[in-house]
């Protein structure tokens, strides 16, 4: 099955906290019909306020021709929320037992061909699908705050998820103007949160050990590596730090630092195999572009980005 | 002593690899006289090529009225390089013994009131200054690639460094249009590299364990957290992810994740004291601005940043 232009696009959002509301705005902005359910007092009013605050930004990013804030309906039961939905996105608090129950409940009311996505930040889909009657349609679809702006969504299937549903989920999120990334091996925290959590834990150690304040940690990122990571991740960043020889030189120069206590995290052994994987990965990502050419583009980007940072974070 | 407009501004750059050349460009662009020394064959020609490639960017960023590429002189001995310099920046390979020797050599030829900065990425200044006759004038001044664009420089003194020299170094780097950050407690990797190295090691684990390719790791950062880190570091990012209650709510929601295997890095115990330090740190950094107000600014920033990323990294 492939999603077409004619495919009905109705999504249900279960749980309307920061992440659930983010999904609502993203789907509305991309021309979907949205049904929302959250038992909390005043949830609908809160969501409407959040939409109002965010709409200017999504408008500037570019609205789908059929985008309409009024295509949102709040309902008062789970059954009503999910019964006609093609995609149901679960966003309840990060507790395994709660999520298992809610997902089983969603599953029991959803129509046969609906896909169910969980926004969990790090719980494995195999663990989430244990109580579902139709576990083959459960994927983790982990977004990033603000969901209506940041394009990344990690898609991860569990042991019982079938590949067709993963592909279908991919197409749904792509229609919502996202950059989906399918992760084949499920691990706690997936990929992005493992990276973020490593940075986060090290940041907490620094504050805990009295080395830096929260503001100093933020400054260390904002004026340094953070500027580069917006355009390139850690690998291409280091590829460019290696000079003409790129990552190959970088690993020679900074490989030994992996043995030093530069973080509380133990490094993997830098075997020849890992080295080659990293070097050829960067070289293939860089493609035909030389390090000097990549540098010129990075420089143009950084100059403009720093102007932007100056304007918005003086 | 305070640097004034009249203070002579002559710097010596020892070692002209990626970082040394980056310093040369930064100092030239900010109106300094620069003397460079590197015994490697063809170093001068290489540096001139690098300056040529980067000059357009520093020009766009804004040149000092007295900035001049011709204010660079290459010399053939250490003595000649350092004898008249007010600030000497050491950028030799990251090996303790080599750096100790070079720094002692610099020290023996430098004039009495010169400051000596080491670009080391993570070696403690106390270790670097052991062979110096005047260790009180050694600071670590750790920059970020590309040094001529990224503003952060970490300044760290060793056990023998005196405070006045730290303050003087701060003023020098500020005159070179940087955002210096003084780190009071010296630890391996200082602050920024501890954060980067944690992310880097986790990234290597992911590649080593076959979970993601280098390109997927980069994508996970670029389309997700990296966009936010350009404007805010990890703390303010999470402050905004916590909704109206900011970091206080965030720690309630994601504090328990610190116990989960979301990275290979062990987290510190989230004690009440650490919680308070993190929460009040974020609240004081946010100042009068509500989370909603910060969100609006972040959104405007992100929309523009994503346009920029789209343009430069299609």
Image: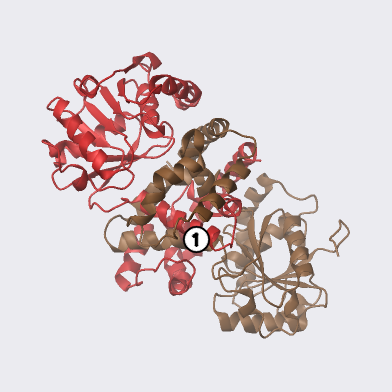
Chain colours: A red, B brown
Task: Name the residue at the front extreme.
Answer: B272
What residue sits 39% from the left and 20% below the top?
A: A44
What residue sits 63% from the left and 49% below the top?
A: B57
The numbered mark 1 sits on a residue in which chain? A
| Residue B20 placement (x, y as % from top left) | 63, 67
Task: Name the residue at the right extreme.
Answer: B6
Whether residue A169 can be seen here: yes
The correct choice, above or below, for B42 with respect to A311 in the image is below
Q: Residues within 10 Å of mark 1 (few under 14, many from 20)?
A: many
Q: Foreground: B285 or B268?
A: B268
- For the C terminus of chain A, the image quarter is top right
Answer with left or right where residue A220 lies relative to residue B215. right
Answer with left or right where residue B116 lies relative to residue A250. right
The correct choice, above or below, for A200 with respect to B154 in the image is above
**Element type at mark 1:** helix
Answer with left or right where residue A151 lies relative to residue A116. right
| Residue A4 placement (x, y as % from top left) | 21, 24
| Residue A252 placement (x, y as % from top left) | 44, 72
To which quarter of the image does residue A266 belong?
A: bottom left
| Residue A85 placement (x, y as % from top left) | 22, 23
To which quarter of the image does residue A268 belong?
A: bottom left
Q: Which residue is mark 1?
A: A205
- For the N terminus of chain A, the image quarter is top left
Answer with left or right where residue A20 lies relative to residue A169. right
What residue sits 63% from the left and 74% below the top?
A: B125
Whether residue A283 can be seen here: no
Q: Foreground: B78 or A130?
A: A130
The correct choice, above or below, for A112 with respect to B122 in the image is above
């Amino acid at each position: 099955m492939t999603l077409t232009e004619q495919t009905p696009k109705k999504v249900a959002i279960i749980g309307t906290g920061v992440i659930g509301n983010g999904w609502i705005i993203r789907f509305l902005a991309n021309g979907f019909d949205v049904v929302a359910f959250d038992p909390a007092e005043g949830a609908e009013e809160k969501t409407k306020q959040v939409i109002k605050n965010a709409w200017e930004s999504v408008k500037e990013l570019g609205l789908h021709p059929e985008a309409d804030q009024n295509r949102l309906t709040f309902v008062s039961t789970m059954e009503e929320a999910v019964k006609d939905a093609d995609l149901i996105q679960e966003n309840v608090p990060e507790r395994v037992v709660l999520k298992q129950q809610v997902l089983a409940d969603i599953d029991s009311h959803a129509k046969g061909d609906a896909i169910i996505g969980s926004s969990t930040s790090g719980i494995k889909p195999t663990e989430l699908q244990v109580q579902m009657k139709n576990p083959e349609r459960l994927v983790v679809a982990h977004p990033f705050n603000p969901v209506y702006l940041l394009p990344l969504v990690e898609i991860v299937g569990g042991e019982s998820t079938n590949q067709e549903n993963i592909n279908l989920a991919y197409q749904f999120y792509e229609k919502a103007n996202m950059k989906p990334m399918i992760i084949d091996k499920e691990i706690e925290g997936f990929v992005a949160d493992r990276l973020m959590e490593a940075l986060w834990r090290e940041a907490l150690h620094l504050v805990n050990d009295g080395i830096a304040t929260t503001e100093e940690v933020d400054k260390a990122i904002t004026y340094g590596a953070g500027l580069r990571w917006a355009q390139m991740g850690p690998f291409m960043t280091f590829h460019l730090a290696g000079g003409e020889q790129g990552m190959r030189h970088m690993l020679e120069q900074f490989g030994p630092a992996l043995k030093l206590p530069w973080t509380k995290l133990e490094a993997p052994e830098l075997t020849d195999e890992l080295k080659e994987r990293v070097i050829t990965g960067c070289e293939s990502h860089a493609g035909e572009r030389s390090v000097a050419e990549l540098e010129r583009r990075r420089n143009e980007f950084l100059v403009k980005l720093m102007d932007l940072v100056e304007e918005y974070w003086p």
